[in-house]
Image (tube, helix red, strand yellow):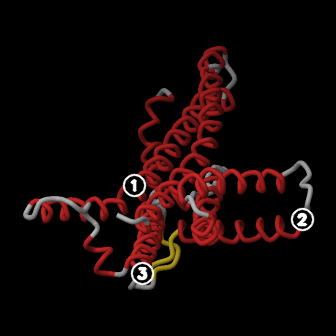
Amino acid sequence: MGPLDELGHHIEELLKDLGGMDMFNFGWGSITTYSVWIIIALVVCLVVFLVVKSRMRLVPKMGPVAAIEATVDYIRKDIGHGVLGSKEAVDRHMPFIFTVFFFILGANLIGLIPGAKAASGTFSATLVLALISFIYFNYYGIKHSGVLHYVKNIAPAGIMPGLNIAVWLIELMSLCLRLVTLSVRLFANMYAGHIVLGAFSILTTLFVFPVINEFTLANLAQGSVSIAWMVLLIAMYAMELLVAFIQAYVFSLLSAVYVMLATSEH
């Protein structure tokens, strides 16, 4: 049996592993492996920022602290001032945007550690994140305009009677679909990335194991293919590092855009 003949079995195991498993079942619910990694991501983010806060200086030095400060400054300028606009809106909403960004980023990066899992790699987690964002921007939209005015202005003003009802229903559906767009985009990108990384890792090991088990010229020639898979794995790993930042940024950007739309005058 050649290495590729075993690939299907290993891919099935990979997909099963990425699906997570129950660690403690209580009947009404369970604690899964992803639940544990969500808690780990929260703790790591908290510890990192407590350390960063204790080491902040007026003139930052090079290193992780300076990198985090630069990231905070960039997000504040690009998303805060670029999307939210006013200083009042930036001061009010950026703590939420920063929390969302760094939690997703931390979860994504932790998920790239061999043996770990990304909290963003399960749809239930990304759906909860999307729900939190959904509640947040609707709450501030209602707080800004009042319930009746906010609900009424889901559809743009100035549309002829009769047609405005249809437009309102379409806009309401579009508003609810933000839950889907936020959650599915993050989950699909991270889940697909982990499948690709897992597949390349499997292919690398499948081609190199015969050489380890029995060193022959035939196995050596076959094992040399694993070098190509290793190169692809490293390239994909680098890409996933970039994707980890991009997905955290996109989720935060869209959340800020929705806050801006909810609190702006129609």
Residue 58 is situated, as x and y percent measured from the top left of the image, at 91, 61
Q: Residues within 10 Å of mark 2 (few under 14, many from 20)?
A: few
Tag 1: residue type?
Val
In the rendered view, tell whether residue 2 sits above or below residue 40.
above
Report the disc number at residue 184.
1
Give the Cα distance between marks 3 and 2.
41 Å
In this view, the residue in front, 57 or 3, is: 57
Side (left or right) of 145 relative to 161: right
Residue 43 is situated, as x and y percent measured from the top left of the image, at 69, 71
Report the disc number at residue 46.
none
Residue 191 is situated, as x and y percent measured from the top left of the image, at 47, 49
Q: In the image, which is nearer the foreground, mark 2 or mark 1?
A: 2
Q: Residues within 10 Å of mark 3 (few under 14, many from 20)?
A: few
Taking the spot 89% from the left edge, 55% from the top edge, the residue there is 60
In the rendered view, tell whether residue 10 sits above or below residue 34.
above
Q: In this figure, which residue is indicated by the disc labeled 3? A: 29
Give the Cα distance between marks 2 and 1.
37 Å
Q: In this figure, which residue is indicated by the disc labeled 2? A: 55
Tell me whether circle 2 and circle 1 mark residues in contact (CB < 8 Å). no
Tag 2: residue type?
Arg
- SS at mark 2? loop
Give the Cα distance between marks 3 and 1.
23 Å
Taking the spot 55% from the left edge, 32% from the top edge, the residue there is 203
Q: Residues within 10 Å of mark 1 (few under 14, many from 20)?
A: some
First along the sequence among labels 3 and 2: 3
- SS at mark 3? loop
